Amino acid sequence: MKISLNWLNDYIDLSGISNDDISKAITFLGFEVESVHNTGAPKFNNVVTGRILTRDRHPNADKLSVCTVDVGPAGGVKTIVCGAPNCDAGNLVPVALPGAILPGNFEIKQSKIRGQSSDGMMCSSKELAIEGGDHAGLMILAAPADANPPALGVAINDVLPPGDTVFDIEITPNRPDCLSHIGIARELSAWFKNPLKYPETKYAPAAGAPARPDLLEAIRVDSAEMCPLYTATVITGIKTGPSPEWMQRRLIAAGMRPISNIVDISNYVMLEYGQPTHAFDAKKIAGRQIIIRPAAEGEKITTLDEKERALNSRMLVIADAEKPLVIAGIMGGENSGIDDTTADIVLEAAIFSRTLIRWTSRQIGLSSDSSYRFERGVDPHTLDEAARRAISLILELCGGQVAGTTHKAGGDIPWQREIQISPAYVNERAGFEIPAADQRAALEALELRITREDKSASDGPVWTVSIPTWRDDLDRPIDLVEEVLRVYGTEKIPPSPVLAPALIGNDDPIVLFNRAVSAQLAGQGFNECVNYTLRSKAEVDAWAPPAAAAGLALSNPFTEDQSHLRATLVPGLLETLKLNQSRGVAATRLFEAGRVFIERNGQNFECVSAAFIIAENADANRAWLKRSPADFYTAKCLVETLASIGGIDLSRQPVEMPSGATFGWQEGQFAVIGDIARGWIARLGLVDLALLRGLGIEGKVYAGALSILSERVKNTSDRRRYQPVAMTPAALRDIALVVDEKLPAADVQKTLAKLARAALPNTFALETVDIFDVYQGKGLPEAKKSLAFSLAYRAPDRTLTDDEVNTAFTKLQEAIAKNQPDWQIRK
Amino acid sequence: MQQELHALLDKARAEFSATKIRADFEATKARYVGPNGSLTAFMKQMGGLPKEQKPVVGKLINETKTALAALLAAALRTIEAGELAAQLGPAIDPTLPSPDAPAGTSHPLTLVREEMCRILAKAGFSVVEGPEAETEFYCFDALNTPADHPARNEQDTFYFPADARFGNISKKVPGEKYLLRTHTSSVQIRTMLKGQPPIRIVSPGRVYRRDTTDATHSANFHQLECLYVDKNVTVRDLKALLDYIFASLLGKDTKTRFRPHYFGYTEPSFEVDLSAKHLPKVNKEWIEIGGCGMVDPTVFDAVGYDSKVWTGYAFGMGLERLAMLLYGIDDIRYFYQNDLRFLRQFA
């Protein structure tokens, strides 16, 4: 809200206090000062008053005039070419002489205009950057007939009215009372300890002119809950016209456009008290009635901004017998406003439900100064005073008289609020001592009157504080602590050490997981990236089954390319790769740790995820740059590491190679381990080559991603148990099996281990079955491969003899021949 | 015999200097000192010699044996040196750059988050996490944000359709809608509902606002919030925490100030300004860094804590904003572009 310093001075004497100090006061009272600026003219050199002596047509230009201008002691009579329509002889105007610098760094020089020399420039208010002036022509400082015109040749700043200082303040939503000059003045009065003067209101309801039922017979509120208080005052015989200059200047300073005296007064009182009012042209009210009623479904009204609005029955209108006149609390209709012919008016001052106004305003997409205040809360108990203030100003500035008494509906809104608080409580919450006298002073300065003091309590007095009607935000003792602190000054909070009793508790397992993943991957040369969570539907469709996009869609995306939750981190990393490649930055190893959302059977599951990509290095063919390239198994090792950080042992998990729809991965070159239904899932391998080409990424990219249900991330800090290390030697036996080439090695390994264990006596154990070679080609039948395994036998307490191991190994070979006829033992 | 022994040595010298690999060496060696070796043959003759010749011949043989041993040792040294040399790769140029990827990097947002968490850990805060997809209760209702509050409106907050289901994110109120959390304060609510005070937590995380992306706004960004609940927690304690955090982060003479403000979930509430002289690219005396306040009793009521017994404070700030101030970064979008030339500057 824009607050004028001149205006504030009506209610509180701020003379002698610098703008900086006022800004600081507003800031520490709890309102952010967004800007401070002066509305007056900037300081000019060589711009002086001058009187136009003669005006002649420019010989070479129809629209220009050649004037002689007397600037008195500033240089005598000058010849100046002027294009303004009002450069008539006799007018006293601002004259910029050569050397003057006008706003926009425009320097005035002696010049020739269409062959006619010109000694300077006569100025409009716009050219002097004076706000709110008439910009159509020269600024007229005095017309020929004016008495006591300013002297000639006087510096213009000495003649122009001094500017006003405007503070643009952000009012927090809890303080609607401060959406007014009086509200801010009240706060400043508390801060500077200067008394507050309320405006003088001359009008008091009295038996005056007779009522005018021919204009307004009755008002009726159909929806008291939505409109708890409505008043309407008939004022007859007014004369419309512009409002006085002082009022216009203040409205302009506060960011409003002056319109006409009645409208301006209504706005002025709103900016003064925070109470919106509305004036109807009485003759436009059909049926002599004002009815406050819910709008009919589909009812239409054209508001003052010339837009037709369709209403519904949850909205409230102020209507006459025939039609809606106003969308209650938001904006008037163009059918009932004040115009040049208006002689009799009905002045509305009312209270509307905050929720109603907020909802309606949002629904029809229309916010006004009035709705802004109503949706935050207008004090019903100030309404009377504000209305009387408006009436006084109307009578004073527009003439006319009040007809009869004010029509009123509702209004018995009870208010009696007291809060009990003790100075000791304030100190306890603050954590330091604020003297009781200072506390009392702070409260009373805000008109929070201490109406009672009970001394009986053991920890000092207890105050009963009466809360004024405009402070609906104060309800509890803690609210008053803030009031005391604000006025006492938050800068006085004394420094102190942090007192932190130790609490048992470790960081969340997710935090530990992310930290370890980050350290692990950064340690392996990966660069951590952060990508957006919200992705396009096209991307989700490319990386997840069709049902996912439906489940992961936002109902109100802001942009089309950010409409869905991400199901995987990999595409974000590819995007990063692409960006770096296109900027000529070599990027090979990237990772991200963050949340993803996996859809399954119509439900979304939020997961903790870590993913990496490894791109081909374009420089890898230079001699000393040769490195073994990344492949599927590089990705596998990394995924296994990530899984172990998350407390998952991948070595025992079945590995799948899905075919058909591969969702971003290259068929036959990627694997899926786990299932989100079991708490986690990993995908790894080569990214689909066609997809990479489509993204414009050069070279192959291997990737891996692990996602764990957020609640299933294990606490890796679980204490481990020591396992004794065997000191006896292992007996090793190798065996090579020729099997079908499609058979996964892990399946063979599993079966072999099972058979080997079955072939053991109970005196020693098979420790490991490691696969150490895979061979396919010469010497083997078509479509077969050879898998070589090394079996380690061990007894914990002695060295095994060859005989006992051989016996077991022979039994194993027999078992293979018997149970796995498709396998052949390679000799 | 003396001549024969000399001849043997000469022959051995020639043969051993020609052996280059260990196998040849062993074979050659066997020809002299093996069971059927030529020197061994001489030694076998010793037994048949007359007694008076034995010392002379014995001496000769011993001398030959010693000389041969030296030959063997020298030959072996040459072979071993050759073996080691064969293990070496090609010559190096130590001025060539390594083609291996340089050490990886943590993202600046991670670095700032972790630094804050370390600072707060020293003050007894442990780190908690919560879901990014939230419900209206945890994000708004429990935080004293009424149903028609502007922050909740569809222009500012991302919502999911009414029938959207999140299998591992519980609803508190039947029929409430899922949304993307607008602040990490929802984690405070979940933490308080899970346990009893005292509580001292910090919740960093990703949050979402329906905003136009520009140099200072982003559809998602990160926050970090602290919550402390205990008996007799005061405004002064809160100020002490803020002073401690920023003195740790920026040096002992860093100052903070509180400006009264309004937040629905704290009372009293403050905005926190930081004395900016330690920050790059800031030419203001004070710069706003976050919001804080004493936990509003209605929040305690919402989670079932007795607001007459428990008090607390909360503090929250934007991590991007902090990182921008600390590093002098002037566009929030750089964090999400991940240009490696950017990422490598902070490691």
Image (tube, rainbow, N blue to C red):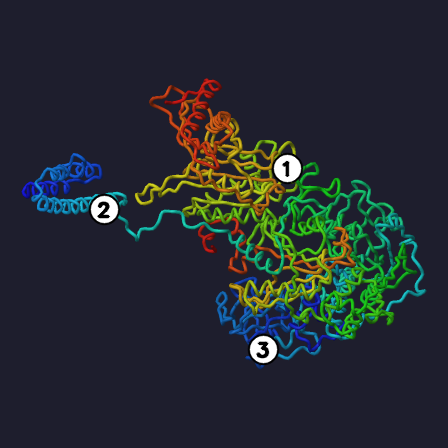
In depth, the one of A466 and A744 nearer the eye is A744
Residue type (three-letter) at the residue carrying disc 2: Ala
- Badge 1: how crowded within 10 Å, few (<14), some, or many (20+)? many
CA separation in Å, label 2 and label 3: 108 Å
In the figure, residue A55 lies in which quadrant? bottom right
Residue under pointer 1: A604
User: Residue A388 at x, y = what percent?
Assistant: 85, 64
For residue B60, above or below residue A482: above
Identity, as a three-letter code, of the amino acid under mark 1: Asn
Q: Residues within 10 Å of mark 2 (few under 14, many from 20)?
A: few
Query: Dot 2: what SS?
Result: helix
In front: A767, or A669? A767
Q: Which residue is mark 2?
A: B81
Image location (x, y in percent) of residue A207: 94, 64
Seen from the viewer's position, the closer of residues B310 and A166 is: B310
Residue B55: x %, y % from top left: 10, 46
Percent of width and height locating residue A650: 52, 36
- The label number, if any, that marks residue A71 in the structure image: 3
